[in-house]
Image: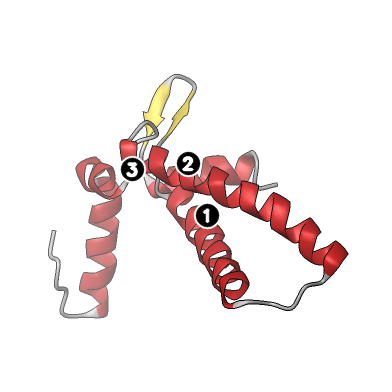
C-alpha cells in the first residue's frame, strides 16, 4: 500500500486497499477490553459524576463562573466529542465475533444506538 500517493487516482486506490487490509484496520482500531479504553471510560465516569453535581448546582445557585468552571466546561466538550470519535474506531463484538473495521463498526452503531 502506497502511503504517499501522487495523484487523486492513487489516493482512491490506496484508500480502497487499506479498507480491504484487515491488519491495517486492526492496527488503527482499539480493542474493547484494552486498558487504555478502560482508563478512558473511568475518566468518563468521573467527568459524568462531576457534571451530574455541577450542572444542577449552577442552574439552582447561578454562581459567578470561575476559571475552573470554564476549564471543566472545555474538558467536558472535548472529552465527549473525542469519545464519539474514539468509539467509532474501537472494535466491538457482534454476534460473537470481533469487528474492527471502522466502516463496519460505524454501520453497526448506526443501525443500533445511533438511531
Answer whether labels 2 and 3 touch (C-beta < 8 Å). Answer: no
- Image mark for residue 42: 2
Q: Residue at x 33, y 35 (%)?
A: 34
Q: Nearer the viewer, residue 71 or 87?
A: 71
Between 115 and 62, the residue placed more toward the observer is 62
Mark 3 lies on residue: 36
Q: Which residue is mark 1?
A: 84
- The answer to which quarter of the image holds residue 35 is top left
Inter-mark Cα distance, 3 to 1: 15 Å
Residue 73, located in which quarter of the rendered image?
bottom right
Q: Nearer the viewer, mark 3 or mark 1?
A: 3
For marks 2 and 3, give the one nearer the viewer: 2
**Is residue 68 placed above or below 46 in the rendered structure?**
below
> What element does badge 2 sit on?
helix
- Residue 85 relative to residue 24: left or right: right
Looking at the image, which is closer to me, 96 or 78? 78
Q: Are marks 3 and 1 in contact (CB under 8 Å)?
A: no
Q: Position of residue 80 (x, y in %)?
A: 55, 58
Mark with earlier residue (2, 1): 2
Q: Is residue 9 left or right of residue 104?
A: left
In this picture, residue 22 sits left or right of residue 82: left
Of residue 23 and residue 65, the one placed in the foreground of this image is 65
Q: Earlier along the polypeptide chain: callout 2 or callout 3?
A: 3
**Residue 29's x, y, as percent?**
32, 46
Where's the N terminus, which quadrant?
Answer: bottom left
Q: Is residue 24 left or right of residue 114?
A: left
Q: CA distance from mark 2 to mark 1?
A: 15 Å
Amino acid at each position: 500500500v502506497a502511503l504517499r500517493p501522487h495523484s487523486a487516482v492513487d489516493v482512491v486506490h490506496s484508500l480502497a486497499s487499506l479498507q480491504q487490509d484487515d491488519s491495517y484496520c486492526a492496527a488503527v482500531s482499539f480493542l474493547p477490553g484494552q486498558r487504555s479504553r478502560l482508563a478512558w471510560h473511568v475518566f468518563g465516569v468521573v467527568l459524568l459524576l462531576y457534571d451530574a453535581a455541577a450542572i444542577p448546582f449552577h442552574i439552582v445557585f447561578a454562581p459567578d463562573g470561575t476559571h475552573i468552571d470554564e476549564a471543566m466546561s472545555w474538558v467536558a466538550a472535548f472529552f465527549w466529542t473525542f469519545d464519539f470519535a474514539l468509539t467509532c474506531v474501537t472494535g466491538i463484538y457482534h454476534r460473537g465475533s470481533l469487528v474492527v473495521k471502522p466502516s463496519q463498526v460505524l454501520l453497526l452503531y448506526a443501525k443500533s444506538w445511533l438511531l
